[in-house]
Amino acid sequence: MLRSHYSKEINEEFHGKEIKVAGWVEDIRNLGGIAFIILRDREGKLQITAIKKENPDLFKKLVSLPRESVIAVEGICQKNEKVMNGWELLPKKLEVLSIASTPLPMGVIDKVNVDFDTRLDNRFIDLRKEETKAIFLIRHSFIKYATEFLRNKGFIEVHTPKITASSSEGGTEVFKVDYFGKDAYLVQSPQLYKQMLMATGFDRVFEIAWYFRAEEHDTSRHLNESTAIDIEMAFISDEEEVMRIAEEMTNYAIQKILDENSKELEKLNVEIDTPSLPYPRIKYDEVVEILQKEIDFKWGDDLGTDEENLLAKHVDYELYFIKDFPLETKPFYAMPNGKYARAFDLEYKGMEIASGAQRIHDYDMLVKRMNELGMNINNFEDYLKAFKYGMPPHGGFGYGIERFLMRLLNLKNIRECILFPRDRKRLRP
């Protein structure tokens, strides 16, 4: 193997022992008779201390390498409290695995500011930067622990299709694809499929879902391809049961991130407090009263970016639900409650990060609702079939992963939170 240990794994037991490390040459400091090479791997950094008189050929080879070249080094591990991590490697063997071209399209440790488009155009290098890498290590933790929570609550992981014969929510903002000569579409969400699964007896399902939405927006909080944690659960009494899963999952993941990612949070200069449970519930009618004091906002209007930001200034908490929306503002499958829908949004610092509801589970009620909205029932034949032969009461939510991270880490652009963002202007790399 080219590597026996990551830099972070080195401790007292390795003093005086031979190990193998591998990674990228981040920096070289050549003082003539001695050189210090900073090697970076996935877990951190390690200093390689090369002494010229001990191995002139190896020394020359090391100091002549361009930065960001990839090497594997075998040597003696030595304790040195003056260097990073308190350890250094005295090299005996060197294998150059890849020589980096020069100049680099952007620096990794340089303090020179690089514009965001240049970073995204060279994402493979941008992800070598500690701050950028920290975002995605935290993203990994969030998904890991959010799904761990769901599994502990009896949810089964599923994977639904991403190509469908019709728009999943009846809208027009879909990406059309040629499916062997037939029109097909990239799914906007797994909504209809996860509802159909409630008729199978699985009761509780979750999915790390992909959303594809052909919306011609150009904002710091929208993507045309995004990810979410989608859940659906059956045999519920009302939407509050679904809301409890959303808030408990959020708190569980936040606490785990605080426990496991302190180094990354420090690198991003982020401090997080675990919110108390339950999260406050604000009714839509209350939202209207608050907003009408400052802007022209009518009952039945949807909450956009400006309205969400304004509302956030009037509440004393970061995470809160808005519930009891007007029925007309929510999708056809949301359970009616008079003129309201049994639906909710989860807001985080003035931005919707999740949306959910108790769903209509009665076939006749669902068809009636779709007809009222002028939808083509024929396009939903497979979906509706699941409601004819025994469908329990159910509900769920879609929880935006990038939006959560954007707010958790106080980032200014949602494109920071996904590896290779897709928006109206960006289709590469």
Image: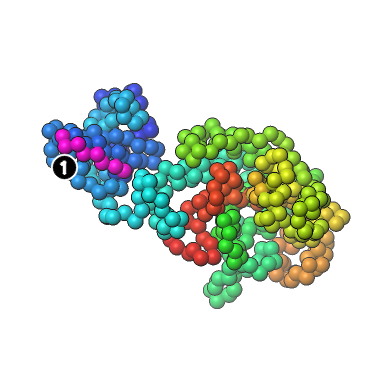
Please check the rendered image and state whether residue 48 is part of the magenta-colored stretch, yes or no: no
Q: Looking at the image, which residue sits at the far bottom?
A: 181
Span highlighted in magenta in the image: 26-33
Q: Where is residue 226 shown, x and y percent of the image?
A: 56, 56
Residue 37: x and y in percent read: 26, 38
| Percent coordinates x, y for residue 341 in the rendering | 80, 54
Q: In the image, 159: left or right of 14?
A: right
The secondary structure type at the circle numbered 1 is helix
- Is residue 395 visible from the viewing direction of this image? no
Asked whether residue 255 is in view, the answer is yes
In terms of depth relative to the viewer, which is nearer, 116 or 20? 116
Magenta residues, dominant SS class: strand
Residue that appears at 43% across and 61% down: 429
Q: What kind of residue is marked 1?
A: Lys
Q: Residue furthest front?
A: 294
- Give the quarter of the image for residue 146: top right
Q: Nearer the viewer, residue 61 or 294?
A: 294
Residue linked to disc 1: 60
User: Residue at the location (20% across, 46% down)?
Assistant: 64
As displayed, is residue 97 above or below residue 226? Answer: above
Q: Is residue 157 above or below residue 364?
A: above
- In the rendered image, residue 29 lying in the magenta stretch gets the answer yes
Quadrant placement of the N terminus: top left
Q: Position of residue 138 (x, y in %)?
A: 51, 41
Q: Residue at x 50, y 38 (%)?
A: 269
Residue in front for this viewpoint, 200 or 296:
296
Relative to 337, 185 lies left or right: left
Q: In the figure, is residue 371 to the left or right of 345?
A: right
The residue sitting at 54% across, 65% down in the picture is 424
Colour scheme: rainbow
How many badges with numbers are in the image? 1
Residue placed furthest toward the right: 338
